[in-house]
Every structure is written in C-alpha cells, then in structure tokens.
Amino acid sequence: MASSSTKTIQDLTQRDYKYGFVTDIEAETVPRGLNEDIIRAISEKKGEPEFMLEWRLKAYRNWLTMKEPTWANVHYPPIDYQNIIYYSAPKVKKQVGSLDEVDPELLKTYEKLGIPLGEQQRLAGVAVDAVFDSVSVATTFKEKLKELGIIFCSFSEAVLEHPDLVRQYLGSVVPYNDNFFAALNSAVFSDGSFAYIPKGVRCPMELSTYFRINAADTGQFERTLIVADEGAYVSYLEGCTAPMRDTNQLHAAVVELVALKNATVKYSTVQNWYPGDKQGKGGIFNFVTKRGKCLGENSKITWTQVETGSAITWKYPSCILQGDNSIGEFYSVAVANNYQQADTGTKMIHIGRNTRSTIISKGISAGHGQNTYRGMVKILKGARGARNYSQCDSLLMSSTCGAHTFPYIEVKNSTARLEHEASTSKIGEDQLFYCRQRGIKPEDAVNMIVSGFCKEVFRELPMEFAVEAQKLLGVSLEGSVG
Amino acid sequence: MLQIRNLHARAGDKEILRGIDLDLKAGEVHAIMGPNGSGKSTLANVLAGRESVEVTKGQVLYLGRDLLAMPPEERAWEGLFLAFQYPVEIPGVSTLYLLKAGLNAIRKHRGLPEVDAIEFLALIKEKMKLVDIDQSFLSRAVNEGFSGGEKKRNEVLQMAVLDPKLAILDETDSGLDIDALRVVANGVNGLRSKERSMLVITHYQRLLNYVVPDRVHVLYNGRIVRSGDKDLALALEKKGYAWIEQEARGMAAGAPPSA
C-alpha cells in the first residue's frame, strides 16, 4: 500500500517520448566535418552574397581559436566537431510557393506533431515559418503581413531579399565571436527565421516557428533575428519537438532581438526536444545563445521559456538594457527529469537610466535530473535608478535530483535597487494526499501542483501556448514525487 | 455505512491503533474524543487512505465494500470526505480550481455529467453562505496565507460542495475562537442529514455543544475504551482524561486484549 503512489509516479515519469519517429525524406547533405570548404559549400548552396560568406569565415577562424566553455554545471562526453554533418536540406525540386507543393511526407510529420500547418492555422491565427531540418519549406500569412510592411521569412530568404537589414543587425546583439557556440553557429548556420516590424506597426498575430531536427547526426544551427523598429510590437513563438535518436545531437542556435525606441518584443519558447532515454542515453545537446537588445528608450523585451526537453540545456536568454527606461523580463520554467541536465538563466545588463528588469525562474527537478539557475544582474555606472527583481524557485520531486542556484550581482551605481528571492520546496506527500482525498487522481494532482508552481510563468505565455506548455509539463513529469 | 473491526495500524515503527471496533450507521454523528497521542488523527488518516500509515491488522467495511483496498481518490469518489486537521497550502492553485476538479472527478465516477465553470460558480456561491466566506476566497491559492479559521472554514466549504456520504472531521474545532467555532459548527449542522454520517474527532467537548453527537467514543492508547451518549463528553469535560487513563490502566491489567 505504501508504495502505490511511488509506483504511479514511476509509471508516469517513465512514459516514452511521444514524438519519436523519423520521417523518410531524402536529405541533401554536405560531407562530415568542418573546414573552410564546407562553409563555402554551405554559403554557395544557399546562393548567399559575398558579405555573408565573409562573415561566416571570420566567425569560423575565430571559433578555431576558442575553447568550449566548461563553467556550466553540466557533464557530457567530448563532442567531435569533425564528425558532424553541418548542412542538411530536404531535397526539393523547385522553389515552394504553396502548401500543395510541399512534400506530403513533411506535412504528415507536422500532422503527427499536431502542428496546424495549412488551413487550420489560418483559423488559429498563427503564421508559421516551419523549419524542417535546415531549410524553411513553407511560410504562410506572408501576404497579410506584407500589407503591413512586416517581413517574416526564412533567414536565407532575408539574406537574399533584405541584405541591408541583415547586414545592419546580424551580429549586432550576439557578435560572431561572442562565445564558442555562437561562433560555431555564425560560421555554419543553415537557416532560421527573420522578422522585421516597421515603425509604429503592431504585428496583429503571433509569429511562430516550429523547429524540427530530422536527418540523423545533423547538427542544427538556427539563426533567428527579430527587429522591432520604433514603436513596433511583436510576439514571437518558438516551439520544438524532435524525433527519437540514439546518438546525441548538437543544437547550437543563436537568437538576436532588437527593440528600438518604444518598441516591444515578446519571445516565447516551448522546448521539447528528445531528452534521452531513462538511462540518460541519447538526447539533444541544446547550447543556445539568446540575447535581446533594448536599443531605444522605453523599449521592452520579454523572454518566456518552458524548457522540458533536451539531455543538456545551456541557455541564458538575456537583455541588454541600453535605452533609458527600457525593460527586460525573463520568465522561465525548466524541467530536468531522468538524467537531464539544465543550466539556464539570464543576464540583465543595465546600461541606461531607470532601466528595469524582472527575473522569475522556476526550476523543477525529478528523477536524477540536475537543474541549475545561473543568472547575472549587472548595473553599469550610468544606470541611475536601475531596478531588478529576481525570484528563483526550485521544486524537487525526488530524493535523487538536484537544484542549484548561482546568482551573480554586479552593481556599479549606488542608486540601483535590487531584490532577490529564492525558495526550494519538495512536492509533499501532504499536498498529493490532500488532492487525492478530494477525488483527484495522483497524476492529475501532480499536474495541478506543478502548474500552480509555474503559474507566474505560464500566464506570460500566449493562451494557446500556455495550454500546450501545461500539457507538455504533464507528459514530462507528472507525479515524479519520490 | 462504516464498520471497523479490530483495526491495527502503525506509522513507522510505532503501533498507534491497537484494535479499533466501531459501527457508524447512515445519518449518525459519532464523536471520537481522546487525549493527544491517543490515535485520533491516525484513525482519520487510515480511513482516508494516507499511505504513511500502515494497516497491520483488521478490516474496514464502507457501504459494504473493503475500504482499505481502495486508493484515496476512489474513497473520495465513493463519498468519503476528510476535513483535515492541518490543511496544506498549494501555491498557485485556486480553491475554485481544486474543488471543481475534485467534484468533476467524483461526478464522472458516478456517471454524472461534469459541471461547467458557470454551474460550478453558482453551486459554490450557494454553499459559501453556509460558512460565511468572502468571495475573494475562491480565487486565492488553496490555503495559502489563510488564517487558521479560514482554513477550517474552507474545509467545511469543500465538504458542502463535494456532498459526501461519510464525513470525517479531524479536529475541525481546534484553534478556533468562539465565533469561528460557531460558524464552523453551523456549517456542519447544516450538512447533517439522514443519508450522511459523520465522524467528528475532537479533543474538547465544546464543539459537541453545537454539533450534538449520537454517540461518543473515547480513544485511549489506540483503543476505544469507552462509548456512550453525549453525556459521556460532558463527564469527560468535568473529570478530564486522567479519569479515562486510570480506568484504562485498570482494564489493561485486568483483562487481556481479546484479539
């Protein structure tokens, strides 16, 4: 009798990864390994202008001099960067103009994932730039956005169609030599999304991208750049699932956000990549550099993330608060179950006057998972009246998991005000029993308790995304009380 | 309704219940009294199915079924309700949400359609009158930042909404001032019916001035050492538990346990 709740919990946490399947599509790839020829080949395949190739090569040469970072609280076997295929694209005969021309296999995959690509998404009001492996295959709603002067397209297309914008902003937030993984990405990035919202335009719909890693052993190097011009507003959604794989897959994406005067950018992520099996075998290595710059005064950038997947997550969506009165926000739920390791957090760099930042981090650890919050709040000399509020809560669901918090604070202006709150709690048998006594099944009860714990973050997500995130959380760890 | 036979239970290494026998019929209200550590709360927890308490011997029949074989949620579906002595806090989960989920799980089990948000709100507002609770209460997280009195009222409110057949009230009167006690007692009395049985666990007699029991049992050292009508509670109040202790010691020396 005493073990029945433990058993349910085990059943639930050992549920198989729901999205593990491989789509059978002929992929066009470059040979394994990395050298200048490979980079030239990638650039050529994409028909890029010279400046792009130069930038890639600069990044590559820099990368060669850099060392993989070891400061994160994660452990993994060495990555052989010469054993990775750096480019893979589904073979398409010609340019895709409409959904009818898209490989039906691809569409089936999306269906399995429940991505409403096609007519349904028109109803849902979501424009999806779907990245399948490395090349965008379908972009919808483009016309409607075009009317407003909004550019939302694949990165490759932006390089060709809007080279001036790309040139102006690419690397302006995350330079090509920023860190080891960002440099690697800058050298080999295959595709990603680009959005530009012109002056004074409020983007009427959530822009959304679904990433999906498919071809075996293909590193994914996405590059996303979002620019909100003066007074513009945009909310961007990023959601991911990946098929089941036995070998580790590297993912090193870069996301750059730029908000000019009075502009607002909201960037929301639900990340559900393959976390590896119950023994910790396989799974995605997610080494991502995400950063936003509040360039103009009164600008605002909000990062909201729900990280449930990946074997290893190394990710610090940050804000550079350069404009006076600018605002940075970071809302995060990170889950580490089984043998997952998450080292995630944010950096808030206050440069301008009266800049404000808020950090709400909810870490959930279950099984043997290790969850680390690493955050930095930096107030520079000129940031008069800067304010920060940080709250880091950890929820433990087993006696074998771990939660760690590393907050760094650096203040160079005496008028700054900072608050930091932290808590660690264990899902209690008491809470679980209370819910069950009210007639709620243990799996639903844990769902409820965890959702309650994450509420402050979920309410920052767009509605439909919040529902998805909540479900995902349920699948990833319902009832991991041990 | 409820038949308890020779029930033994322990928490950890400690044997706490040492042979409880009890019969509770439909519509009856029984009070369980006893000094601290006599096993009152353990009995409540065993009946509700808390897993940290292990039943080592005995049987409990509830509506003719083996209660101990059911997981806690199934007991709830079958109409058993426990008003907790120390209701837990569940941050971020509103009382409204918890209760609606509970009620619908119970209704689903009974083959009834689920109530939607609007119906539920109407229902709960009706029940709130019973315990004199402010409406802001519903959107607050379960028991978070509630005063002792609010927590207990919340328990009675939940009982009213879930409409149980057997309600176990575990020291619902403890920590209440006289006004709050009256509110809680009125709520409980409002829920008395021919179909509903109640097991009222209390340390003090004062609750029983308001909620008048059909039977009173005195629990001491894991056994029911004395049963009687409401006057037993009054006698106990007058003489104190020392009286029972003495008597129980005498009993234990004279007659070995029948099991």
Image: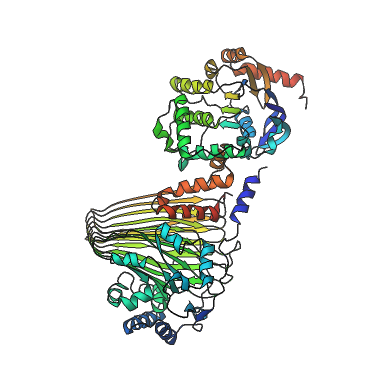
- Residue B50 visible, this angle: no
Residue B160's place in the image compared with B228, above or below, is below
- Residue A206 visible, this angle: yes
Quarter containing the N terminus of chain A:
top right
Q: Nearer the viewer, residue B117 or A368?
A: B117
In the picture, measured across the screen, residue A53 lies left or right of residue A440, that is: left
Residue A279's place in the image compared with B189, above or below, is below
Model colouring? rainbow
In the picture, measured across the screen, residue A4 lies left or right of residue A103, that is: right
Q: Residue A295: give x, y in percent of width and height.
A: 25, 64
Write the residue at 59% across / 63% down. A277
Q: Residue B241: give x, y in percent of width and height.
A: 60, 18
Q: Residue furthest bottom?
A: A37
In the picture, measured across the screen, residue B228 lies left or right of residue A365, that is: right
Residue B94's place in the image compared with A318, above or below, is above
Residue B37's place in the image compared with A361, above or below, is above
Examine the image and state in which quarter residue A234 appears.
bottom left
Looking at the image, how many numbered discs can be counted on the residues?
Answer: 0
Q: Residue B170: give x, y in percent of width and height.
A: 56, 28
Examine the image and state in which quarter residue B167 appears.
top right
Write the residue at 47% across / 35% down. B119
In the picture, measured across the screen, residue A174 lies left or right of residue A113, that is: left
Q: Nearer the viewer, residue A406 or B40?
A: B40
Q: Residue B234: give x, y in percent of width and height.
A: 58, 13
